[in-house]
Image (cartoon, grey):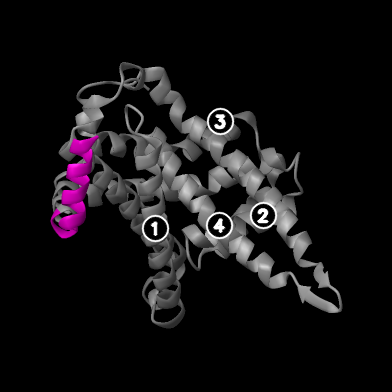
Amino acid sequence: MPLLNKHLAHILKHPGAFLLQAAKSFLANNGLLLAGAVAYYAMLSLVPLLILIVIALSHVVDQAELLDTAGRYLEWLVPSQSRAVIEELLNFLDNRSVIGWALLGSMLFFSSLAFSVLNQAMSIIFYHRFAKRRRHFLISALLPYSAVLLFGIGLLLLTMLVHGVEIMSEHELVLGSRHWSLERVSGLLLYLLGLGGEVLMFTLIYWFMPVGRLSFQHALIGGVTAALLWEGVRRVLLWYFAHLSQASVVYGALTTAVVLLLSLELAATLLLFGAQVIAQYELMTGSASELPNGENKS
């Protein structure tokens, strides 16, 4: 513990040098190339993933509520393009009668591709863990599909929470003769739900994806940092697309795909760089090699 505190104190004293070393390691690991691969497969996975989840959850929750929640929080992942994604999703759902078992299986495969590639990218960034321990091949094969399941459960819980907050916004807080509308409070709660969902998503990725589970504290710190950084980048993207972007003039009909890929690549870069920072800290402190034997396997 004193040694870890010594390393932490050194990092806090020289944060620039630590981040510069992390950036060098990130580039040495072809981090930008990995982020591009994750973004590409995330774009391929996004619509099939949403189709499967909406079809499955529409037996439990109203489809309109699911789509409303998905559209609301897709804006956090793909700024200014959530409407286009939801429209494509609706076009498919209107013809859901054509879905057979073969198409369902192929959609499940494509929806898991992004998680498969992300898992491989994490193994490169956390190479020091991969060199000492390996996952069982069945766990590696099932991990992407487990991520799809968790994503679906998350959307279900988020939809239920959003529905509860929207009902609350229709009421007033009454104290004596004073009446306060809860609409502003509900707006703040919806924002916090989105931000909390981002933090949780990043944290779970950092916690489960690397070989040999990270400490939850490290994963949470990485999750909070990555989510806050993405929130800043997201707002810059929203402003840029609203005021300066001429993408529609340059790319025409390809605009949605190009903007979607750009947003996903920036998000993937932040995600993988956050993982690199955690890996750099582990290499500096040797904390990965000090895990108990029970934690050395995934």
Against 239, is 186 above or below?
above
Callout 1 environment at 10 Å: few (<14), some (14 to 19), or many (20+)?
many
- Specify whether 68 is left or right of 107: right
Callout 3 environment at 10 Å: few (<14), some (14 to 19), or many (20+)?
few
Q: Amino acid at mark 3?
A: Gly
Whole-number angstrom distance, CA of label 1 to CA of label 3: 25 Å
Magenta stretch holds residue 222? no
First in sequence: mark 2 vs mark 3: 2
Which is more foreground, mark 2 or mark 3?
2
Q: For the residue labelled by badge 2, is the local secondary structure a helix, a strand or a loop?
A: helix
Location of the C terminus by quadrant is: top left
Which is more foreground, mark 2 or mark 1?
2
Tell which residue pokes out farthest to the bottom in this image.
243
Q: Which mark is residue 261?
A: 1
Against 178, is 41 above or below?
above
Which residue corresponds to mark 3? 105
Which residue corresponds to mark 2? 67
Q: Position of residue 72 (x, y in %)?
A: 60, 61
